[in-house]
Image (cartoon, rainbow, N blue to C red):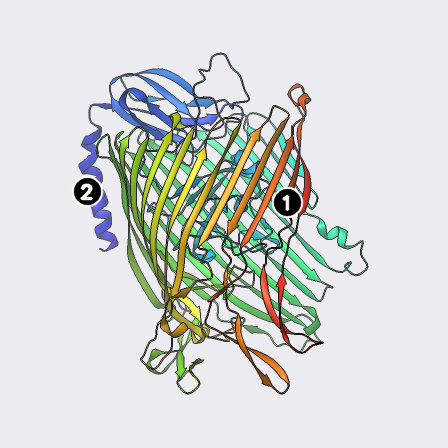
Amino acid sequence: MTPKKIIIFLVVLLSSISCFAQDKFTLSGTIIDANSNETLIGVNVVIPQLKTGVTTNEYGFYSITVPQGTYSVQISYLGYQTIEESINLNQNIKNNFNLYSNETALKEVIITDNKTKTDIKKPEMSVNKLSISAIKKMPVVLGEVDVLKSILLLPGVTNAGEGASGFNVRGGGADQNLILLDEATIFNSSHVFGFFSVFNPDAIKDLKLYKGGIPARYGGRASSVLDIYQKDGNSKGFHVNGGIGLISSRILAEGPLVKDKGSFLIGGRSSYAHLFLKLSEEQKNNTAYFYDLNTKLSYKLDSNNSLYLSGYFGRDVFSLNKSFTNIYGNATVNLRWNHLFSEKLFSNLSLIYSDYYYGLDLDFIGFKWDSGIRNYNIKYDFKNYISDKFKLNYGVNGIYYEFNPGTIKPSDVNSGINFDQLDKKYAFEPALYINADQEISDKIALSYGLRYSMFYRLGQSTVNIYIDDNPVTFNSELQIYEKATPIGTKFYDRNKIMQSYNYLEPRFSLAYQINDDQSFKASYNRMVQYLQLISNTSSPTPLDVWTPSDRFIKPQIADQVALGYFKNFEEGMYSLEVESYYKEVQNRLDYIDGANLIANKAIEQIILNGQLRSYGLEIMFRKNEGKFNGWISYTLSKSEQQTPRRTPIETGINNGQWYNSVYDKLHNIAITSSYNLNEKWSFGANFALQTGQPVTYPVGQYDYLGINVPSYGLRNENRLPAYHHLDIAATLTPKNNKDRQWKGEWVFSIYNLYNRKNAASINFRQNIDTGSNEAVKTSIFGVVPAVSYNFKF
């Protein structure tokens, strides 16, 4: 289907269903925090008499269309007092609601039950939402609150080990996760090689992880979407909050630009552990630190128009004796315009810039290296609230990419390094989508949509030409893959299209409500990923290079189906979520043995195309309210990769058989809990256990000129030892907080309470004294106590 036909289909569909809204009236508006005017995402707006309701969108807007009548409207949101208001709906009404936090007591507010029970009726599945208040209660390494570490406690989510960056979802790679901060893409989500995330928890308003059933408005990655929104800022008064820890501190200020209309937010974090290195004579020339900055400006032009300007900037600096310096980080800017065309049609126009930079300076050889990826994104999204039973989301977006695989230059005039620029790469990725949410009956609800994505690899680059168009050859005598020798080259000008792709990406999910407390759900989605991360490590590193799909590197195409059972117990005090899934990914890359990825001008010569499959069972049991709450999650899963023979004489990888991917974790158990003893003390604990990561060990050795050389077995047929740790935390809130503007709390935590020496890696080497090979385990953390002080005023 061409883009023109899809647009025609959209117009016809909109006009044909407009009759659904006839003889009905619409209640719409925005829901905000009464103390700050912060818009609230995902607030439930329910009309119990009709057993119908909606939730607010990413900008706090809601719209519900129902028959004329007088109704009781309930507004509920986690951490806030639930309110109930009677409304006579005899015309279209715009009503903005103010919600007060549970800390505020007002007589005119009707307080009812406020539970975080599972949404049985909504066809949304494979989605996890975490509140920032819950994340801040979780004990983490070195006492630093961490968004990414918190999602590792969810079912279907693992990491590549202690101190590893990124996260893996349902057996996929970390590069297959789309990470968004205020709609801008974050390409590297970690500070200090995975010890911390780039997200300042004080600046975050909402977090949602999509593992499956992904709405059509998202695209570009094969595994998951982590969608994070920053706070808008307080437009009622000036406030400051922050925290002081052992190795890092943070501060955030927010306040009005124009009271009740405009606001600002600015927050910063920095680590200072490197300052302690200066006290040691051996370490005084070494440096390892990070810093980042979050900013946002919000302004309400009128009741129908709002502007937002948000940004993020972060850098990591790592240096050894000034002879090795590594600097990397993200920068994003997003200008957004919210416009309300009518009480039923909401729109958002975004202009987005995102940049990831990596720099390396090797002073001892006079070598500098710069690389990165930059994109410019324009997107226009619409949400059309046709009726209380039917809603449409549709929109378009276009992303322009600039890739710098590497700029090599001398660091001084005495350097023996010559300047070299690997060919920069350019690409354009437009897409359009439509998605519908429809209630077929009281028991059946559907969400279905279609995304049409396109990709154009653009010119200003030289491409190698190979015999039979094959950049990798197989040496049948040595039984190994080797680089093919180019027989020529072809140069494409900047305006030329080197390669193009286009795919339809259908999405579908269904919920069948058995009764008020339980339901079955099912989903299917196809995702296409046009960018590839060139890396042969189990977790992303700053040195990894992103590259676009081209003639030799095909897009990854992921198809996933999921089935689930969901149940609430005792009026929502407890909930159970059980899901099973199966996922296949076409064109997943692997590498020939001995592949060299750094500064490689012909990356296609070391790449083999394969496929990935993963399947599993996820169980999550939660206690949603009371002094003691938390959850237990368990995942039983399998993730396998296959790189088959291209011809009968070839071996493929592992003889063309399925083999464990580096993300395969058979068992994954996570337990998190919090207990509020009283107004002064609260406690938290986490336990995590997962199967060891697949690795390749030597199976023998041979002697070469008196040196023992290990001989390795099949790829990923061995494993590291099981990974597990227990963390605890206690929060002390002084009683006099209530009586003064300055409020503080002390957080005491212990990471890895029983001092488990988890293996980050196991390396094999020859013992200098004995001459025999030996295995050496590398562990990063033992037990780590920490204390931090958080404040606000």
Kindly report the distance in space between the C-alpha atoms of the residues bearing marks 2 and 1.
62 Å
Crowding at mark 1 (Cα within 10 Å: few <14, some 14-19, many 20+): some
Quarter holding the C terminus is top right
Occupied quadrant, residue 84: top left
Residue 134 place in picture, x, y as percent: 53, 35
Asked if one can make out residue 653 in the rendered structure from this viewpoint, the answer is no
> Label 1 sits on what residue type?
Leu
The residue lying toward the viewer, choosing from 425 and 81, is 81
Q: Are marks 2 and 1 in contact (CB under 8 Å)?
A: no
In the picture shown, does residue 317 fall above or below 62?
below
Quarter holding the N terminus is bottom left
Front: mark 2 or 1: 1
The residue lying toward the viewer, choosing from 760 and 137, is 760
In the picture shown, does residue 109 fall above or below 622?
above
- Tell me the SS state at disc 2: helix
> Label 2 sits on what residue type?
Val
Residue 261 place in picture, x, y as percent: 50, 28
Instruction: Please tell me which residue is depicted at 30% across the width and 41% down the height of the picture.
Output: 521
The residue lying toward the viewer, choosing from 176 and 462, is 176
Residue pointed to by mark 2: 12
Crowding at mark 2 (Cα within 10 Å: few <14, some 14-19, many 20+): few
Q: Is residue 596 left or right of residue 616?
A: right
Residue 753 is labelled as 1
- Tell me the SS state at disc 1: loop
In the picture shown, does residue 422 fall above or below 681?
below
Residue 228 place in picture, x, y as percent: 48, 42
Q: Is residue 661 left or right of residue 8?
A: right
